[in-house]
Amino acid sequence: MQQKVLMEKYPVFHADIAKSETTLASADDVVDFLKARIDADPGIAYVATFDHYAHTQAIGGDINPDMKAARNVVFCFGKALPNPDVLSVRPRSIGVADMGDHFHVSFLEAPMKLANETMEGWVKSMRNT
């Protein structure tokens, strides 16, 4: 996984996973893989899967022509609510883009170290599954 700052303000973790490195063949396969990891942890709640590609296409938005699919898997670690401002950084989301020969998987850095380590582990475990 690599880290970058997107648009000069958003700390993002991302990885490109070649389809030859995984048995996952589609964005839906990746979503199912991630959802299984979420469902396996009683401390994490699955919220939804958002088809960002279909939404953008439906409103006539611009889509990178190399992108074949784009989904967001939405979930929440939510171990505590110490103040109301923490709601602004929840729930979490992992973006999955099918770029034809590879998947681009990304997520915004969470304020909780364990959340980042968990999400990074899920993404890394996609290789050679």
Image (cartoon, rainbow, N blue to C red):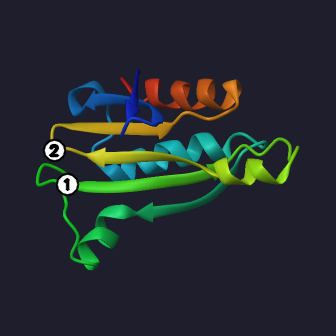
Identify the residue shown where x is 30% and y is 38%: 104
Identify the residue shown where x is 68% and y is 24%: 113
The reply to whether dot 2 and dot 1 touch (C-beta < 8 Å) is: yes
Q: Is residue 104 left or right of residue 45?
A: left
Q: Is residue 21 left or right of residue 85?
A: left
For mark 2, what is the residue? Answer: 100
Identify the residue shown where x is 51% and y is 43%: 34
* Label 1 SS: loop
The crowd level at tag 2 (other Cα within 10 Å; few <14, some 14-19, many 20+) is some
Quarter occupied by residue 105: top left
Give above or below for 3 relative to 59: above
Q: Is residue 85 left or right of residue 102?
A: right
Q: Which mark is residue 30?
A: none
Q: Is residue 26 left or right of residue 100?
A: right
Residue 74 image position (x, y, % from top left): 56, 54
Q: Nearer the viewer, residue 115 or 21?
A: 115
Give above or below for 39 relative to 104: below
3D distance between C-alphas at marks 2 and 1: 6 Å
For mark 1, what is the residue? Answer: 68
Counting residues from the start of the chain, the first of labels 2 and 1 encountered is: 1
User: Which amino acid, mark 2?
Assistant: Gly
Give above or below for 128 relative to 86: above
The crowd level at tag 1 (other Cα within 10 Å; few <14, some 14-19, many 20+) is some
Quarter occupied by residue 129: top left
Q: Nearer the viewer, residue 28 or 121?
A: 121
Identify the residue shown where x is 70% and y is 30%: 112
User: Which amino acid, mark 1?
Assistant: Lys
Residue 7 image position (x, y, % from top left): 36, 40
Residue 90 in sight in this render: no
Residue 26 in sight in this render: yes
Residue 44 image position (x, y, % from top left): 72, 45
